[in-house]
Image (cartoon, rainbow, N blue to C red):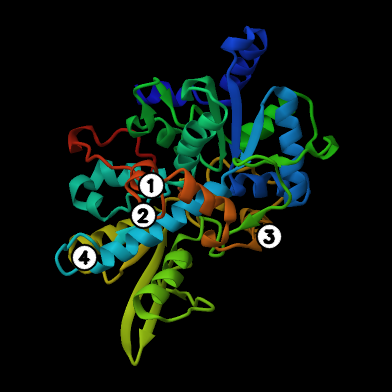
Amino acid sequence: AESVLVSQQSHEELCKLLALNKAAAAHEQKLVVVSVSPQSRASLAARCKLGLLETAQKLTMFLKSLGVHYVFDTTFSRNFSLLESQQEFVRRFHKQADDKKALPMLASACPGWICYAEKTHGSFIIPHISTTKSPQQVMGSLVKGYFAEQKHLPPDRIYHVTVMPCYDKKLEASRPDFFNQEYQTRDVDCVITTGEVLKLLEQEGVSLADVDPAPLDTLLGGAAEELSTHPGGGSGGFLEHIFRHSAQELFGIHVDSIHYKPLKNKDFQEVTLERDGEVLLHFALAYGFRNIQNLVQKLKRGKCPYHYVEVMACPSGCLNGGGQIKLEGESSKEELQKVERLYESLRAEMPGENQAVRELYQHWLGGWGSERAQQVLHTQYHAVERANSALNIKW
Ligand code: SF4
């Protein structure tokens, strides 16, 4: 069933839906919403030799010309993932004396990693994985929850598409945890990769550079004037955000800049907060299968020294995801550097500073730390019996 759901998610599927929508009576039409990830936008911008805002606005116009109604940016939903992760980490830190599985907390935004953990290390690793939903799935909850309410539509009248840097996001969207039983609809109906957006442009005979710009939409209404990012790299900045926040909240220490110490390779690095020679916080990032295996072995031997690990399945993280566009005539290193430079060219924003995020916490989620925020913004994981575990692991 999982593979059928995944095969239903493609740019062809989106085209079919848009064609059906055009032919349908008004009361049967779906409201089509596309949420674009910042990693995909950077990859498209590099390929089309455009700036990030230009790319976002031209892509918005292109999608709307096909029949899409709203185009959002998943940087917005990442604010919620970062804020919930920071809060979850502090909670776990306080519990560590009574609960041996509270720490290390392991990042949850990468479905490649989650799938691997559930299928190969199941009940041992699961308690360590952050329950916070990924930016894609938070966007799913916001679009089929908040936005549907604003539009006075049931969630199944919205068709929600995300544009992502990897194929594993299709698997994530297909998880039963993100299926609304009452309305028989998924929070994210269809995931298309950055490469599939390029195919869509080619199929329509459109060069993005020639498209007129149109402003991006925002969930609270109105147009987005500019784009912003979060500090801490192309995989979302989870480590940096949680590190800064917990240094301040747990120890009253303000962290200005973060110094990474590479270990075996650039995809395994550590960050430490010390006071008078005592280690207060010890974080790491572990990208790519080799480093993840190493981390899991450390955990199994009870020798993992970290409080938090940003785990990502792809070497170099999400900007290097398998669904990104290959640049013609560039080596993979030059290609990645180009995309990274573009991605980091935006103004960095702290998630707690975003006024629209504050408003949604206050008026829709019932306040910071509320039961409703816990229910809407968190998920759960499931150990898979080892007998079935050989399936679907691509590494
Ligand atoms: Fe997808 Fe790779 Fe990012 Fe994981 S690290 S979310 S597999 S692009």
- Disc 1 beta carbon < 8 A from ligand 1? no
Work out whether residue 328 can be spotted: no
> Is residue 73 positioned above or below 353 on the image?
above
Tell me residue 307's x, y (percent): 31, 68
Do tag 1 and tag 4 residues touch (Cβ < 8 Å)? no
**Among numbered discs 3 and 4, the one appearing first in the sequence:** 4
Give the residue type that dot 3 points to. Answer: Leu
Question: Quadrant location of residue 173?
Answer: top left
Which mark sits nearer the N-terminus, 4 or 2?
A: 4
Precedes in sequence: disc 1 or disc 3:
3
- Find out whether the residues at labels 2 and 1 contact each other: C-beta distance under 8 Å: yes
Circles 1 and 3: CB atoms closer than 8 Å: no
**Residue tagged 3:** 346
* Residue density around tag 4, few if under 14, some if 14–19, many if 20 or more, within 10 Å: some
Residue 188 left/right relative to 32:
left
Which residue extends farthest left?
98
Label 3: which secondary element: loop
Q: Read off the residue under disc 1.
A: 373
Decide if residue 7 is on the left or right side of residue 61.
Answer: left
Label disc, if present, on residue 369 of the rendered structure? 2
* Residue 219 image position (x, y, % from top left): 59, 40
Q: For this rendering, which residue is in front, 374 or 274?
A: 374
349 vs 273, left or right, is: right
Q: Amino acid at mark 2?
A: Gly
| Image x and y of residue 339, in percent | 66, 54
